[in-house]
């Protein structure tokens, strides 16, 4: 039999090296306890995010501001990576043998009927409030995907979009996430002014801006839009992918 | 304060132990699903460690969320990096699980040594023919 297992001695040496490397990294970073002060970049992010318009998108949640304002392009391509991963999974799983599942119990079906609307509301709240509280589109999407998958496994009969509809929602969500950052550039050409990719607020030489507030409700410019589109894309994408993992090409 | 410092050290040490066990699992377990689970544990331990690196709680106080209005919020930058890492890890695990499902259907086993031995035997038989 080919010896493809790593010898125990090599594993022990590997673990020792990893342990020493981690300890050295911690020591070099001076990280032995929580620090009192933020790092330089984080201090600037907190200062700028807490500033009033028109300096920033003024998303009170700093993490959402980092994801969609300070380094929005990174998040955009990360969404693209997830889309590609889901597409690859669907291509691999098409035609695979379904895993046999026992028929769901009435207790599960009843609990899911109560739990599903609550879970979807929580997911929507996480995504839509992601710019003012901890949360965001991805977090909401994962909660929604988990709830929908449990509902499908419980034998949910009425599933309005259907799996083909979920594919369409996923694709549309991703398409709009890719299109939205280009909107300021297109509008800039239309109105004869400057416009930048991922431009949320007006700049000295680029007057286009989304809304900070509408009727007193804080919108943090276009961040809730990104969160909503991410919610749709992630929820639909992971629901289909996980369903295909269980049920194959069914 | 001494107890909290010790507990913090236990927390960090447990993350390192989890990461080390995960690396051992990836290296030593023959079953592909177990390797995948170990990979997930490794990724999650690393993400938790990075998020913990952003903690700035003085001992005895509750951590403040990274939202405007709190005077001493935790560092938001590691959390943003962790969100990206978790998303990519989820996509990776999905692809690896799909590959494992197809491999099982094709080979009838998830044990890597068995699969490789079978491939070697088939290659030798093909050469003999």
Image (cartoon, coloured by chain):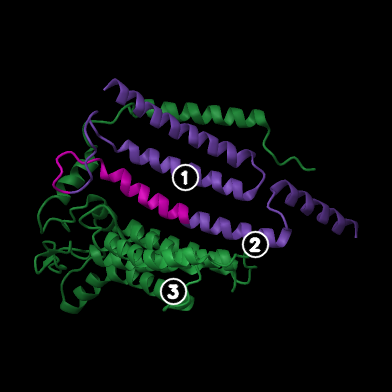
Chain colours: A green, B purple
Residue B76 at what x, y percent from top left? 26, 45
Q: Quadrant of residue A186?
A: bottom left
Which residue appears at 29% of the width and 63% of the height?
Answer: A227
Instruction: Give the main secondary structure of the magenta stretch.
Output: helix
Q: Is residue B21 above or below residue A121?
A: above
The chain containing the residue under callout 3 comes to A
Tell me how far mark 3 sits from mark 2, CA to CA: 23 Å
User: On residue B102, which mark appears?
Assistant: 2
Magenta residues span B68-90
**Element assignment for label 2:** helix
The chain containing the residue under callout 2 comes to B
Work out whether residue A122 can be spotted: yes
**Element assignment for label 3:** helix
Residue B98 at what x, y percent from top left? 58, 60
Residue B101 inside the magenta-drawn segment: no
Residue bearing mark 1: B43
| Crowd class of label 2 (few under 14; some 14 to 19; many from 20; radius 10 Å) | some
Residue bearing mark 3: A166
Which residue appears at 42% of the width and 26% of the height?
Answer: A24
* Label 1 or label 2, whichever comes before in sequence order: 1
């Amino acid at each position: 039999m080919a010896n493809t297992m790593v010898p125990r001695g090599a594993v022990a040496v590997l673990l020792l090296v990893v342990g020493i490397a981690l300890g050295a990294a911690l020591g070099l970073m001076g990280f032995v306890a929580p620090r009192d002060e933020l790092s330089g970049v984080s201090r600037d992010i907190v200062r700028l995010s807490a500033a009033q318009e028109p300096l920033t998108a003024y998303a009170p949640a700093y993490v959402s501001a980092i994801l969609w304002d300070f380094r929005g392009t990174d998040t955009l391509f990360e969404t693209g990576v997830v889309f590609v991963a889901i597409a690859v999974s669907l291509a691999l799983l098409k035609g695979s043998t379904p895993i046999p599942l026992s028929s769901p119990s009435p207790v599960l079906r009843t609990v899911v009927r109560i739990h599903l609307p609550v879970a979807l509301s929580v997911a929507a709240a996480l995504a839509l409030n992601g710019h003012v509280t901890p949360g965001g589109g991805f977090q909401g999407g994962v909660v929604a995907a988990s709830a929908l998958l449990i509902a499908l496994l419980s034998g949910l009969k009425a599933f309005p979009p259907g799996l083909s509809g979920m594919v369409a929602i996923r694709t549309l969500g991703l398409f709009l996430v890719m299109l939205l950052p280009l909107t300021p550039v297109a509008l800039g050409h239309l109105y004869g002014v400057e416009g930048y990719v991922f431009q949320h607020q007006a700049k000295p030489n680029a007057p286009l801006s989304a809304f900070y507030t509408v009727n007193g409700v804080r919108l943090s410019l276009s961040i809730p839009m990104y969160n909503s589109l991410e919610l749709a894309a992630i929820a639909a994408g992971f629901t289909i992918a996980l369903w295909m993992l269980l049920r194959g090409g069914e | 304060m001494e107890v909290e410092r010790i507990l913090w050290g236990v927390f960090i040490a447990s993350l390192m132990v989890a990461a080390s066990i995960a690396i051992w699992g990836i290296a030593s377990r023959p079953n592909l699903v177990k390797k995948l689970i170990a990979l997930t544990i490794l990724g999650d331990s690393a993400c938790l460690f990075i998020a913990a690196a952003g903690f700035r709680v003085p001992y005895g106080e509750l951590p403040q969320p990274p939202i405007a209005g709190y005077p001493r919020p935790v560092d938001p930058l590691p959390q943003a990096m962790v969100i990206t890492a978790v998303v990519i890890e989820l996509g990776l695990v999905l692809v690896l699980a799909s590959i494992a499902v197809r491999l099982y259907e094709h080979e009838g086993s998830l044990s890597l040594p068995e699969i490789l031995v079978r491939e070697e035997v088939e290659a030798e038989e093909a050469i003999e023919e």
